[in-house]
Amino acid sequence: MITPSIARAACFLAILGTAEIAHAESDAKNIVAIGGSVTEIVYALGEEDRLIARDTTSVFPAEATKLPDVGYIRALSPEGVLSINPDMILALEGSGPPEAFEVLKKASVPVVTIPESYDRAGIVAKIRAVGGALGVDGKAAALAARVEDDVRTAQKLAAKKADAKRVLFVLSLNGGRVMAAGARTGAAAIIEMAGGENAVSNIDGYKQITDEAVIAAAPDIILMMTRTGNHPLDEETVFAHPALAATPAAENRAIVQMGGQYLLGFGPRTAEAIRDLSIAFNGDTQ
């Protein structure tokens, strides 16, 4: 079956395959990586010496944080990116704002958009697209095959666990309102890949939901990204929320927190994230 992510990747690679573009991009030595998973893939391919900068979400491996930071993936400044003098920009789909990339393209810097989708095929497509842009298709094919096999195995093991837990992914509690992850989100995808059930699959995207909707969702587990800084969302803060306090998750003090890029990156470490999340949901019963 040809999935949308594979189709996008095939289209991308067909464009990349033209002689002039392929030569210009595969020879690039001064690359800016935008998107944490894109940076991880560059390192996993052993091509990190070609990176000269990265975005704020690129925090793994730790060596990547030593590179200059050109800003947040969705709020980039073209002047900041161009000040690094790149000869190629690898940007995850959804990077922005769009006007920033219009400026970058007008500056004649090759911009390669890497496709993003939240499934196993999407991870494979992403790895192959990065490898194609770097001119290391062979290494990318080997990495993609290994990662695909690892993710498939992790999903199969997670699927063996009985009684899928209802999981509510809470993005924030700004203003006392629960911002949750509905269908067609990375959070929903990783929950399902780990054998859980998204408690609010009746909504699309990341949305604020009412207290009544939180209670009706009746999650067994609250899933969140690990937060640092002045306003961390710890267990006490979460379960002090009136609606969350009325859920089965609060009764059992069931909350799981993981690093955002690890959990939602959909890259080389996704199989590990699935295994860790599955254990967090159900215990190590395999």
Image: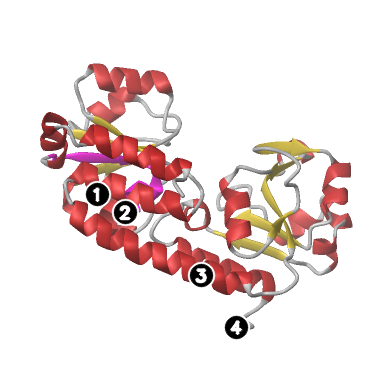
What is the distance, in whole Å, between disc 1 and disc 2 at their CAs? 8 Å
The disc, 2 or 3, on the residue closer to the chain's N-terminal end is 2
Q: Is residue 58 visible?
A: no
Please state the horizontal and vertical placement of residue 44, each as a whole percent of the image: 28, 59
As shown in the figure, which amino acid type bears the numbered disc 4? Gln
Q: Would you say the residues marked 1 and 2 are in contact, meaning their CB atoms lie under 8 Å apart?
A: yes
- Which of labels 2 and 3 is toward the front? 3
Please tell me how crowded label 1 is: few (under 14), some (14-19), or many (20+) other residues with Cα within 10 Å: many
What is the distance, in whole Å, between disc 4 and disc 1 at their CAs? 35 Å
Please state the horizontal and vertical placement of residue 187, each as a whole percent of the image: 60, 50
Q: Which mark is residue 131?
A: 1
Mark 3 — residue?
154
Nearest the eye: 249 or 11: 11
Q: Which residues are magenta?
A: 28-41
Task: Give me the residue at 33% from left, 18% from top.
Answer: 102
The disc, 1 or 2, on the residue closer to the chain's N-terminal end is 2
Task: Give me the residue at 67% from left, 53% from top.
Answer: 233
Mark 2 — residue?
41
As shown in the figure, which amino acid type bears the numbered disc 2? Ile
Q: Secondary structure at mark 1?
A: helix
> How is the protein colored in the picture?
secondary structure
